Image (tube, rainbow, N blue to C red):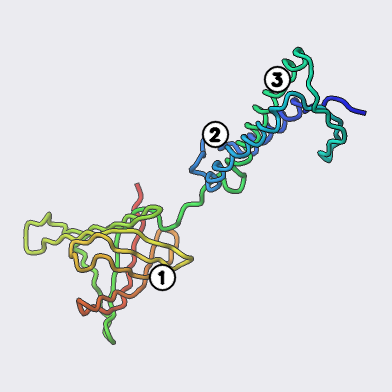
Amino acid sequence: MSGEFNIDFQLLGIFLSLKIWHCPTIFSCGMNCPGGRDFERIPKAIYATTTLLSRRTFTGAGDFSGKITNVDTTHSHDSDRSNHSSETMKVIITLILTVTIFMSCDVNTGKKTPVPLVGTWQLIAASSTEKDSTFSTFNPDIRMIKIINDTHFAFFSHDLNHGKDSTAAFTAGGGTYTLADSVYTENLQYFIDREWEDHKFEFVVKVSNDTLTQRGIEKLENLGIDRVIVETYVRVKK
């Protein structure tokens, strides 16, 4: 026994509505979603579906397992072709919507978890250990901030007297970084002292509430620098 292989568009409509409710950020996250890269597979899926449904007729009997038992690919009358063309377009549009919704967002990845380091931090304490000697390097007359986004960091420091006396000081630098668990590695690409550029510095970081502590080694053989530094920052709020 054979018959037309139909899709229940009402059930698909309900399903799509539930999916959108399940993932309310579907139309806003786009390529910024962690799963956004999956959009790259959508054109291939649409092409394959369109190719399959572009036949003149597509009839047969099927069950819920998706197996079609009797397929008739003979040519239909013009009126049947017209009706089938309309139904085919409905199927294509529905499948495009379905693929888009499934590939663009997931309830577990719709919201991106921010990196805890991201933000603006002000230095409140610093120390350096060289050989067996440890001493404070923090100067309360100088203000230093570090700005960290998803991929880059930058730091700036200057004296609080606007450079008008012997305490005048200014330092700036920045670059890219990587973060693996608690290991934070800075790739210093820009610095006021050019001999520091293109060096990597590895730190172990810890974030507790609004306090960031980083501990690591600064080592530049060409400058004779080899020391352990510990810096403590507090998050700068708006």
The image quarter containing residue 92 is top right
The residue carrying mark 3 is 85
Which label sits on residue 27? Answer: 2
Q: Nearer the viewer, residue 44 or 28?
A: 44
Left or right: 57 as drawn, with respect to 201: right
**131 relative to 161 in the view: left or right:** right
Quarter of the picture holding the N terminus: top right
Q: Amino acid at mark 2?
A: Phe
Dot 3 or dot 1: first in sequence order is 3
The residue sitting at the left extreme is: 165
Query: Nearest the camera: 66 or 161?
Result: 66
Disc 3 or disc 1, which is closer to the eye?
3
Tell me which residue sits at (34%, 62%) in the image. Answer: 233
Q: Earlier in the sequence, mark 2 or mark 1?
A: 2
How many residues crowd mark 3 within 10 Å: few (<14), some (14–19), many (20+)?
Answer: some
Q: Is 16 drawn above or below residue 203 in the view shown?
A: above
Pointer 2 with pointer 1, Cβ within 8 A = no
Question: Mark 3 is on which residue type?
Answer: Ser
Tell me if label 3 and label 1 are in contact, CB under 8 Å: no
Of all residues, the one furthest to the front in this rendering is 74
Question: What residue did someone put label 1 on?
Answer: 204
Sooner in the amino-acid sequence: mark 3 or mark 2: 2
Query: Judging from the image, what secondary structure is the residue with disc 2 in?
Result: helix
